[in-house]
Image (tube, grey):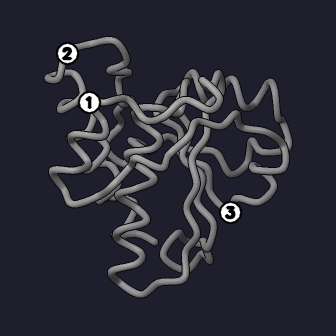
Amino acid sequence: MPLSQANFQRLLFICVGNICRSPMAEALARQHFETSGLPVEVRSAGVGALQGYPADPKALMLMEQRGIDLSAHRAVQVDATMTTWADLILVMEETHRQTLRLQLPASSGKVLRLGHWIDQDIPDPYRRNLAAFETALGLIERSLGTWLSRL
């Protein structure tokens, strides 16, 4: 079934710590679906989550500039319940897809890179400067746009 005809109602975004990239992607996607009135649930998690940690301050600031409040976000570890729940799992890097394939093999068929359509991994900005966060966010926005036009 072509993506445009697929029924994706539950999206899961994955990065490593679940404090930078995946929470930003989750927040942007949620805003899009709420604004467009589409009944799509969105979550995020990490393959090596800093469980219970809030979003990185730079991610908070960049999202705030876009009118999105990430202050309630707390990092969670991806597990089988989440991957079963999701219709589509979008990871930031190919290595995340490989990790999921090894740790949660039942999820393999629904895991793709967020940057699939632009053939691009989203580099991890963790512990880097604001420019690294802006670059990652720009790639997330660009990649997310390519997915949203297909869903």
Up-down: is 11 above or below 48? below
Up-down: is 150 above or below 65? below
Mark found first going from the N terminus, 1 or 3: 1
Q: Residue at x 38, y 49 (%)?
A: 70
Q: Residue at x 50, y 46 (%)?
A: 73
* Front label number (1 vs 3): 1
Residue under pointer 2: 129
Q: Secondary structure at mark 2?
A: loop
| Residue 127 percent coordinates (x, y) | 34, 12
Estimate how packed mark 3 is, as few (under 14), some (14 to 19) or many (20 or more) residues with alpha carbons within 10 Å.
some
13 or 55: which is nearer to us?
A: 55
57 or 132: which is nearer to us?
A: 57
What's the mark number on residue 58?
1
Disc 1 marks which amino acid? Answer: Lys
Quarter holding residue 29: bottom left
Q: Residue furthest bottom?
A: 37
* Front label number (3 vs 2): 2
What's the mark number on residue 136?
none
Disc 3 marks which amino acid? Answer: Asp
Residue under pointer 3: 87
Q: Residue at x 32, y 21 (%)?
A: 125
Quarter holding residue 66: bottom left
| Residue 64 percent coordinates (x, y) | 22, 50
- Left or right, 85 with respect to 22, comes to right
Q: Secondary structure at mark 3?
A: loop
Disc 2 from disc 1: Cα separation? 9 Å
Disc 2 marks which amino acid? Answer: Asn
Assess whether mark 3 and mark 1 are in contact (beta carbons under 8 angstroms). Answer: no
Q: Secondary structure at mark 1?
A: helix
